[in-house]
């Protein structure tokens, strides 16, 4: 097993991370919540590896991590007009939205459903990598399924680290709390996971009530 290439979150290493992703590589990356593990979202074999590395059931979807609203719109069928305040006021940030997927999103990411979770990551180095890649990353937290996620690179399980191609070491990065997951395909919108952003804040932004139905182990991780 080859050692992963570990790089700091510096401008001169952006090309290295992007090239790894273009070649089907798996990377570990910092976010504003916890460290993630991901691949370019159309690299199906690489995405299969992520599930195997994490020991994660293929029925649990991954999230698409985007650099901006344009990348988000690329992978969803549509964004409800009444939800635009969410993207304007709470994104980029620790909020994942469940929306109907576009046709270019592979089944493996969605658990073979017609929905996909998307978020716009508020972490500068990740943003620059995804922008240069011109593509979202399909991913989840960099931990074994069922174990705690971490915002500290030093705490990432070495067994996971050794199965990746490139790892971005930003030290302690992010809040350590998961992203909130909000399903916008239901009426009213449904809070599937309580995370960094609370129900009251979401309701204040969209000016409508939110249903709370948290489901353990059936939703994508941060």
Image (cartoon, rainbow, N blue to C red):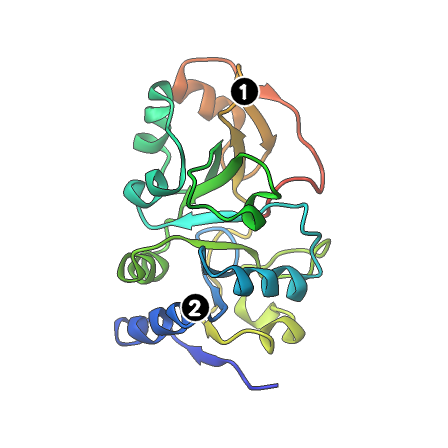
Q: Quick check: 108 above or below 191? A: below
- Residue at image position (45%, 41%) is 118
Q: CA distance from mark 2 to mark 1?
A: 37 Å
Q: Nearer the viewer, residue 214 or 72?
A: 72
In x, y percent, where is residue 128? 29, 60
Mark 2 Cα-neighbour bin, 10 Å: few <14, some 14–19, many ≥20: many
Q: Which residue is mark 2?
A: 170
- Kindly indicate the quadrant of the structure image that contains residue 85: top left
- Residue at image position (54%, 35%) is 181
In x, y percent, where is residue 126? 37, 59
- Residue at image position (55%, 73%) is 164
Q: Nearer the viewer, residue 96 or 198?
A: 96
Eye-nearest disc, 2 or 1: 1
Q: Quick check: 212 above or below 108? A: above
Give the number of the disc on residue 186: 1
In x, y percent, where is residue 211? 59, 18
Q: Nearer the viewer, residue 52 or 97?
A: 52
Q: Quick check: 211 above or below 163? A: above
User: SS at mark 1?
Assistant: loop
- Does 147 sit left or right of 62 as displayed? right
Q: Earlier in the sequence, mark 2 or mark 1?
A: 2
Give the number of the disc on residue 130: none
Q: Is residue 177 visible?
A: no
């Amino acid at each position: 097993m080859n050692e992963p290439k570990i790089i700091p979150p510096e401008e001169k290493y952006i090309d290295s991370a992007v090239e790894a992703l273009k070649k089907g590589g798996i990377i570990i990356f910092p976010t504003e919540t916890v460290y993630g593990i991901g691949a370019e979202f159309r690299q199906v074999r690489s995405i299969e590896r992520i599930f195997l590395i994490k020991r994660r059931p293929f029925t649990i979807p991954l999230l698409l991590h985007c650099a901006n609203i344009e990348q988000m719109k690329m992978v969803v069928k549509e964004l409800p007009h009444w939800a635009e305040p969410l993207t304007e006021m709470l994104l980029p940030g620790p909020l994942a939205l469940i929306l109907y997927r576009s046709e270019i999103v592979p089944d493996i990411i969605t658990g073979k459903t017609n929905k996909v979770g998307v978020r716009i990551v508020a972490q500068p180095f990740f943003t620059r990598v995804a922008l240069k890649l011109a593509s979202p990353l399909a991913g989840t937290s960099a931990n074994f399924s069922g174990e705690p996620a971490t915002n500290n690179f030093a705490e990432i399980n070495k067994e996971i680290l050794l199965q990746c191609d490139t790892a971005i070491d930003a030290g302690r990065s992010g809040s350590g709390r998961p992203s909130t997951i909000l399903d916008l395909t239901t009426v009213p919108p449904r809070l599937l996971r309580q995370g960094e952003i609370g129900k009251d804040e979401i309701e204040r932004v969209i000016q409508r009530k939110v249903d709370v139905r948290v489901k353990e182990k059936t939703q994508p991780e941060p």
